[in-house]
Image (spheres, helix red, strand yellow):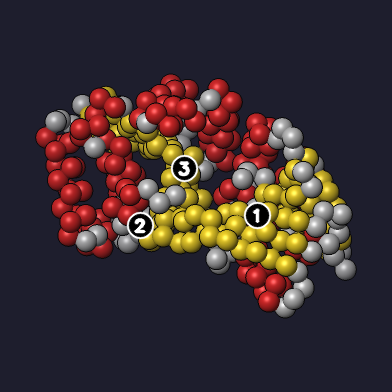
Amino acid sequence: MAEFALKQFEDLRQDWDDLRRKSPARLLFSSPSWCEVWWQHFSEDNELYLGAVTEQKNIIGIAPLRLKDGILYFIGNTLLLHLTFSNHKVMDLSPLLPDSTAYRLFTSAARGGKIKVECLNDDVSVALDLPQDLPAYLSRLNSKQRHELLRKERRLREEGEVSYEVKAEPAAGDVDIFLDFFRESREDKNRFLTPEMESFFRDIIGSAAADRTLRLGMLKLNQVNIAATLCFDYRGEIYLYNSGYNPAYRSLSAGLLSKYYSVKQSIETGKSRYDFLRGAERYKYHLGGSETQLFRCIINI
């Protein structure tokens, strides 16, 4: 008989990492380090509801949840059986991929009449499977996309020496450059990057560097940094978390090309997939991405 108990982060770090290594699911944003950093910055008005499921004294599942106003949410924005052990009968979970264990479990239980589940279209996620070489990647783009991308790259190279460097352990100055570019590239990003959010970015970058998943890319023109990409490398897949560029190089498409060079570098290093993550920004499709519907599921027991 499985048992459910609430725990603290320090109680579960090793078991949590062990479970992630064994799981076939993509669990980058459900890692203990990610959830703990998020909790340290954004836990106000929330109660930690970090559940562990044990069977014969072995931890077989972890539910990284938070409780707010009587409703359970994922920490960081990652299960049905365990909800029955508590007095809290409502979960509001998003974003859920259609092939995720949680989505399949909830919808199956709803069809069986065991619970009430309302699943709504929440957003889309955009990603692309990477081929073995750059010519194969470019051949997948339609003729207009390919022409425009190569034209932009050619124009940038006409301005001088172009390079793209990826750092797994960036210096503090590199992080400063990324945050400056993030802030300067768009007004909405500038508003988003509050002091608290900047602190979160710095801590999550430090945590990812310690976990060996960080990939901070710098696009340079004539040895001058003009754009930056913040990515994570997990199980041979690259996740583009955010980016920014120097507005002085907007006419040279520095923002788009930094992402293109990130895709190129991922292909060259043998990565299998490039995930642009949540959101339907146009550049993701211009770089060959395909969308997957994300869901928000409200579960009542």
Identify the residue at image location x=55%, y=22%: 195
Q: Amino acid at mark 2?
A: Gly
Q: Amino acid at mark 1?
A: Leu
Mark 1 vs 2: CB contact within 8 A: no
Q: Nearer the viewer, residue 295 or 257?
A: 295
> Which mark is first along the chain, 3 or 2?
3
Identify the residue at image location x=55%, y=38%: 208
Q: Which residue is mark 1?
A: 93
Left or right, residue 229 beside residue 135: right
Identify the residue at image location x=24%, y=60%: 141
Locate residue 221: give its quadrant.
top left
Disc ID at residue 241: 3
> Which mark is first along the chain, 3 or 1?
1
> Which mark is first along the chain, 2 or 1?
1
Provide residue 5's location: percent of width, then percent of height: 85, 53
Gap in angstroms between the C-alphas marked 2 and 3: 15 Å
Mark 2 vs 3: CB contact within 8 A: no
Disc ID at residue 289: 2
Provide residue 204's location: percent of width, then percent of height: 56, 35
The answer to whether residue 26 of the structure is visible from this angle is: no
Between marks 1 and 2 in the image, the one whose residue lies nearer the viewer? 1
Image quarter where the C terminus lies is bottom right
Q: Secondary structure at mark 2?
A: loop
Gap in angstroms between the C-alphas marked 1 and 2: 25 Å
Image quarter where the N terminus lies is bottom right
Identify the residue at image location x=19%, y=42%: 153
Q: Amino acid at mark 3?
A: Tyr
- Crowd rating for badge 3 (residues with CA inside 10 Å; few <14, some 14–19, many 20+): few
